[in-house]
Image (cartoon, rainbow, N blue to C red):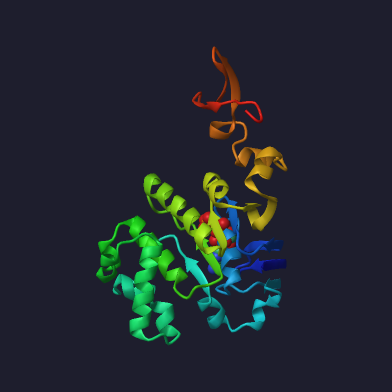
Amino acid sequence: MIEFRSVTKTYPDGTHAVADFDLVIPPHTTTVFVGSSGCGKTTLLRMINRMVDPTSGVIEIDGESILDRDAVQLRRSIGYVLQNGGLLPHHKVVDNVTTVLRLEGTPRRQARDRALELLDTVGLDRALAERYPSQLSGGQQQRVGVARALAADPNILLMDEPFGAVDPIVRAELQTETLRLQQELHKTVVFVTHDIDEAFLLGDQVVILEKGAQVAQIGSPSEIIENPASEFVASFIGAERGARALHTKQTERGTVLVDGAGRTQGVLVEDGA
Ligand SMILES: Nc1ncnc2c1ncn2[C@@H]1O[C@H](COP(=O)(O)OP(=O)(O)OP(=O)(O)O)[C@@H](O)[C@H]1O
């Protein structure tokens, strides 16, 4: 479990990125931070692995303050996936995946075997191990980024807009892959996105944020869609437009559900039918 208690971050230039933030992140589930640009999502994420230290407040992992942990050790024990993959361009895929393992002293041969297994895990052909990142597609690079983050078998996986830079089709593929991986691995995933559809697809717990990381609503996707806490949330999730604003239409065969764009999305059936 990860817990934020009264966490504040003010950057040296006076920017209040996070103000008095409280949150419990349950283990083995996916929590998504979603909000518009600059609301503090990345700052929250980076405080978990101490790439950014809070100005005040406490962050605990399994009841222990992370400030009591060695920052380098902590960072290595937590997987981190960045938007552009963050791969080292002059290192082959296999060496990118094994970076943390090698730093921790795992023998080269063993680290390599683990890297090949991880390529299987993230759905990449082992033959790609010898390539350089520039010889991969954007989607493949992201998968390598995930393999690298999983290398040390961390309990916690931080993902910062990991699919922001790929086209919509690859993005959908990677989202499905993330759901599959999570069913298999049961990590505590903390995922940052500005895309509410991605948040609802991947999140067990979704945290909708406003500027200064003010919490607009926390809940499961169903809870938020069924009961938005404010006008802001209703508007942010598109409750009155697009794919989520469904209305009924009578047809000769029964009632169908139509979205805000006029497309029929499904058929209304009675409970138990
Ligand atoms: N190193 C820094 N120094 C000063 N201000 C910063 C620094 N890093 C972030 N900020 C500011 O803190 C606020 C929150 O930034 P953060 O990157 O956490 O937001 P975000 O929600 O992740 O945004 P985005 O979706 O655009 O990545 C913003 O106003 C940003 O400009």
Quadrant of the displayed image that contains ligand 1: bottom right
Residue depicted at x 63% and y 46%: 221
Residue 260 in view in this figure: no
Q: Splitting the image into 4 quarters, where does residue 128 fall?
A: bottom left
Q: Is residue 70 left or right of residue 129?
A: right
Q: Position of residue 270 (x, y in %)?
A: 65, 26
Residue in the foreground of this view, choosing between 109 and 40: 109
Image quarter where the C terminus lies is: top right
Q: Position of residue 154 (x, y in %)?
A: 52, 72
Residue in the foreground of this view, choosing between 110 and 70: 110
Residue in the foreground of this view, choosing between 219 and 167: 219
The count of marks equals: 0
Residue depicted at x 71% and y 74%: 63
Residue depicted at x 70% and y 61%: 23
**Which residue reaches farthest top?**
252
Q: Does 94 appear above or below 165?
A: below
**Which residue reaches farthest front?**
273
Q: Is residue 23 left or right of residue 138?
A: right
Q: Does 234 appear above or below 260?
A: below
Q: Position of residue 191 (x, y in %)?
A: 55, 58
Image quarter where the N terminus lies is: bottom right
Residue 267 in view in this figure: yes
Residue depicted at x 65% and y 40%: 225
Q: Position of residue 84 (x, y in %)?
A: 40, 61
